[in-house]
Image: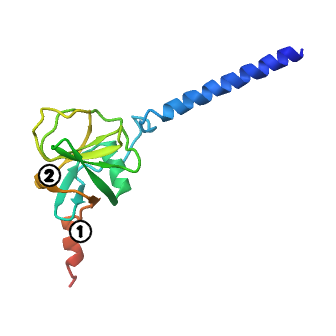
């Protein structure tokens, strides 16, 4: 009888250990644990500023959950990392959602997210046909991305002030 109880307890212990290992393995995948079909508030068209000591780039975000996650983190001060003479990277303090499609295609001005980092990147040159790793597109800078080539140190990411909000705030009634 004691042998059966010991075997049952040992089996329970191993079962619990395997369950815990499975849960830990799921957490280590690096993907956000948000269901793909759950809703989020779109930030499509929202503009953010990427500000260094000498450069300011305005990026228009797309309609992705990852972009919405980034906006929720702002403002951020991050360290710039050179990425093979065609992009500047920035490591985030936490991961963004990764349920969107990825790509290796890019154009100068594209702004993307690499989940394995978790890193952001702004592409300032088109010397390569593709990126080395797949990224989730977050948005695009129409102008100014090329100026990031010579930047180093820290960068500040913050929401850009909307023109309409600034104008209406300066108007006086009467």
Residue at the image position 39 percent from the left and 35 percent from the top: 37
Q: Is residue 3 left or right of residue 31?
A: right
In the image, is residue 92 above or below residue 170?
above
Specify the farthest residue to the right.
1
Name which quarter of the figure residue 171 lies in. bottom left
> Which numbered dot is residue 149?
2
Q: Earlier in the sequence, mark 1 or mark 2?
A: 2
How crowded is the residue under tag 1: few (<14 C-alpha within 10 Å), some, or many (20+)? few
Under circle 1, the secondary element is helix
Picture coordinates of residue 156, whole percent (x, y): 28, 60
Give me the C-alpha separation between circle 1 and circle 2: 32 Å
- Under tag 2, what secondary structure? helix
Residue in front for this viewpoint, 168 or 55: 55
- 46 to 65, vertically: above or below: below
Residue drawn at x 18%, y 66% is: 163
For the residue pair 114 and 170, the one nearer the viewer reads as 114
Which residue is disc 1 drawn over?
A: 165
Would you say residue 146 is visible in this rendering? Answer: yes
Res. 42 visible in picture: no
Residue sitting at 19 percent across and 72 percent down? 167
Quarter residue 83 falls in:
top left
């Amino acid at each position: 009888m004691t042998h059966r109880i010991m075997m049952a307890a040992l089996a329970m212990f191993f079962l619990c250990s395997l369950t815990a290992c499975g849960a830990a393995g799921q957490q280590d995948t690096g993907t956000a644990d948000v269901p793909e079909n759950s809703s989020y508030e779109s930030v499509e068209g929202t503009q953010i500023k990427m500000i260094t000591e000498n450069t300011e780039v305005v990026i228009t975000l797309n309609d992705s959950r990852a972009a919405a996650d980034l906006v929720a983190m702002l403002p951020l001060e991050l360290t710039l990392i050179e990425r093979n003479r065609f992009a500047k990277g920035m490591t985030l303090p936490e991961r963004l959602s990764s349920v969107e499609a990825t790509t290796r295609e890019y154009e100068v001005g594209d702004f993307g997210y690499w989940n394995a980092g978790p890193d952001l990147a702004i592409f300032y040159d088109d010397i390569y046909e593709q990126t080395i790793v797949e990224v989730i597109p977050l948005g695009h800078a129409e102008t100014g991305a090329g100026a990031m080539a010579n930047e180093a140190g820290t960068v500040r990411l913050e929401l850009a002030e909307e023109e309409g909000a600034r104008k209406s705030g300066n108007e006086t009634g009467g």
